[in-house]
Image (cartoon, coloured by chain):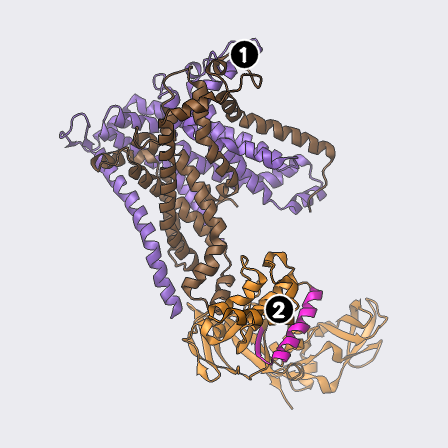
Chain colours: A orange, B purple, C brown
Amino acid sequence: MGQITLQGVQKSFGPVHIIKGADLDIADGSFVVFVGPSGCGKTTLLRLIAGLEDVTGGAILIDGRNVVDVPPAKRGLSMVFQSYALYPHMSVRGNIAFGLKMAGIAKDEINRKVEAAAATLNLTPYLDRKPRELSGGQRQRVAIGRAIVREPKAFLFDEPLSNLDAALRVQMRLEVTRLQKQLATTAIYVTHDQVEAMTMADKIVVLNAGKIEQYGSPLELYEKPANLFVAGFIGSPKMNFVTGEPAKQQGAATVGVRPEHLKVERNGQGGWPGTVSVAEHLGSDTFLYVDAGPLGMLTARYVGELGLSPGDKVSLIPDPARIHRFDDSGKSIHA
Amino acid sequence: MATQQTQLLARTLLTPAVALLFIWMIVPLALTIYFATLHYNLLDPGSETFVGLENFRYFLTDPAFLASLQNTLVLVGSVLAITILLGVPLALLLDQQVVGLSIVRLMVIAPFFVMPTVSALVWKNLLMHPVSGLFAWIAHLFGLPAIDWFNDAPLFSVILIVAWQWLPFATLILLTALQSLDEEQKEAAEMDGASAVSTFIYITLPHLARPITVVILIETIFLLTVFAEIFVTTGGGPGLQTTNIAFLIYSQALIQYDVGSASAGGLVAVVLANIVAFFLVRIVGRNLEA
Amino acid sequence: MARMVTTQRKVISTVAAWLVGFLIFFPILWMVLASFKTELEAFAIPPSFLFFHWTTENYVTVQERSDYFHHALNSIIIAGGSTLIAMLIAIPAAWSMAFSPTKRTKDILLWMLSTKMMPPVGVMVPIYLIYRNFGLLDTRTGLVLILCLGNLPIVVWMLFTYFKEIPKDILEAARMDGATIGRELVYVLTPMAVPGLASTMLLNLILAWNEAFWTLNLSTLEAAPLTVFIASYSSPEGLFWAKLSAASTLAIAPILVLGWFSQRQLVRGLTFGAVK
């Protein structure tokens, strides 16, 4: 079981409030991603759950028990660090076995579990190597192996893929997701990369300046962002925001349209007219950066190839069903 | 909570080191200050009387003090100049691609690990001896008269020995600093059309400014109290020609048994060293933040 | 990217570097050669460089004079003892400052550094008198004590910088893995710190072995280490060059070897981390 509940969790370092009261319910077996810009408190929140930092206020419940006074090792969680934090003087086997050894488990059982974990992660040929003899991806796997072998109530991942190159990151992303589904163990995963968040999560927690902005499934966040911050943070390329007359017409302070929901018409009439300033041709997609005069720079995404060049006049027509409206305080207005 | 427990443990573990160093610093220093105000001669025990600043007046106006102060400054200044002026090019040379660099490094660093009494005696006898020394023979090969080093240029001879001992230190530090210089910076300068000389002046030298400062400060602290090299070669002579402050204090305390003025001299040495230490501690402290 | 260097340039730097290296090393080499000559040859003009009558007679003589070993043993005890005690005091202190720093940690470190800056002559008089009154003059205990205190700041600093480099993540990982503080120390911290501990010990052995202020002033015969023994050769001139060389070679050989191993740590230890 691994049901984690945060109730009004606060953390201050001296006068600086890092976490300003977080409430959250994480269901057993779910994959939850904390995402947000750097400095938003996502790693701190994870470390509070881990017990590596003491909370300033509030409660953290794991399976209904408040653990704020329980030392990290006794919380039944395991963690994968950004730097991997492998023990450099121990072999892969030693690294994976360390937690079990500390728990006083019998030797042959440790061996059995370590070998099972290694097999799951394709690490068997490397069991007797030292971390420095492994590639980045392999080290990452060892760090994960060390986490799964203890059969914890939940895995905590602190930006585990940020040190890998792009291709490997995509591959490990898939592997971590698959592994988590296979083990059906709760996972909390911290990242600043919203693509990782969207692709891996069952539920996403968007954090900003120590506050939870929204908690929901990836598609909820994409389709119904709670406010301007979430709308701007989730989705790539970023959502276009327009203020002024077009917003007023919709009865909002700001309206937002995602680049993929802008129809591009060559020399078209109506909509928002502008001049192409940069066109990026990816083959599968075309990204247009359009100077729309008083509306500012707008981004449009066209699926497929669109033969436009800088200087061409276009008209951008928002899909009326996909316009997001925000009030003065930045909150979403739902019809 | 665990963290508070850890902190208490940490305090306890720190205490012995701090306490010992505190005693080691404060007790002798306080005693030195106390003795410096006494008329106190070991040959005349029991006659200690309070004389105020008399010892300082005596020590500071003693012609031997001025001579030894001058010798100290010349010694420190010359050794610094030699070790840095030779150390920079040497470090640059060792930073090049050299076949067998590790062996060259070992040869260059070796003098630093030789105990001062050994290096002083080897130089004095095997190299600088006016009749049988190697230098005398080399001078002879060129048809020059042999130099009687320790009679004709005693202070310079001491400087030479001390500089030989400290050149490796300067070189090693400068080399370490050079190796941390980003190669791309030099390449960027090259792309910008800088010649080797201007790359050295505008990129390398500024990068070396800090390590050079550190070398100066640390060497100064050690060089202010050079002792063994003088003790085994010249014994401070001839006359006072190689007596530095450290040696003067030694001779006043353990040859003339004048504890009072030796203590006053000791305090003068502490003040001198502190002026240097002030800057060094500042540099190290700034580094600690980063 | 290491740059391609023309062969010509490489040849020039190689020749120059070897030449300079040889010049700097020469006095030591010359001493070692002299130690294998007869006294007459060591003194002879013109000197012979390699084609002399090689002999180990001087080493035998030095060995026969049992007081050489007496002093060598003193050196070992004094250098080893002071280093070990300094380590025992410094390890907990450095551990505490590296892993549980407080607002005052920096000040304490800098204050420790400043005690090292105090010139020994400044406190020579009271130390000498204290030693005389407590019967510590010319005792190994006395020398161990003073060298230990003298080097303690360097030991603390070096260990501190080594401990500081151990990533906090790894200690946290150990804590997540259920290790108590004691087990963290035994299984994770100590094995990772061993290289740092070793080089700190090495550098301090060297410093203590070569220390030539306190040893010259506080010991004469009984406790005198090799620095003092060698200094005793300073008065009679000439006739003992070969034996002086042999004794000196023996005195510096072990430390030279240790020094070669620890040359990289030297920078960090003696500059208190100001140069990396």
In reply to whether residue A182 is colored magenta, the answer given is: yes
Query: Closest to the observer: B155 or A82?
Result: A82
- Please determine whether, in this image, residue C273 is positioned above or below residue A150: above
- Please determine whether, in this image, residue B241 is positioned above or below residue B277: above
**Residue A118: which numbered mark, if any?**
2
Q: CA distance from mark 1 to mark 2?
A: 73 Å
Amino acid type, mark 2: Ala
In reply to whether residue C253 is colored magenta, the answer given is: no
Query: Closest to the observer: B95 or A106?
Result: A106
Q: Quadrant location of residue B75?
A: top left
Q: State which chain disc 1 sits on.
A: C
Name the main secondary structure of what is drawn in magenta: helix
Q: Which residue is mark 1?
A: C46
Q: Is residue C121 left or right of residue C209?
A: left
Amino acid type, mark 1: Pro
Where residue C254 sits in the image (x, y, percent)?
47, 35
At x 73%, y 73%, the residue is: A298
Q: Quadrant location of residue C179?
A: bottom left
User: Can the viewer see residue A197 in this picture?
Assistant: no
At x 34%, y 58%, the residue is: B11
Q: SS of the residue at dot 1?
A: loop
Q: State which chain disc 2 sits on.
A: A
Q: Residues within 10 Å of mark 2 (few under 14, many from 20)?
A: many
Q: Is residue A153 left or right of residue A305?
A: left
Where residue A279 sits in the image (x, y, percent)?
79, 68
Query: Closest to the observer: A248 or B30?
Result: B30
The segment highlighted magenta reads: A166-189
Where residue C99 sits in the image (x, y, percent)?
43, 59
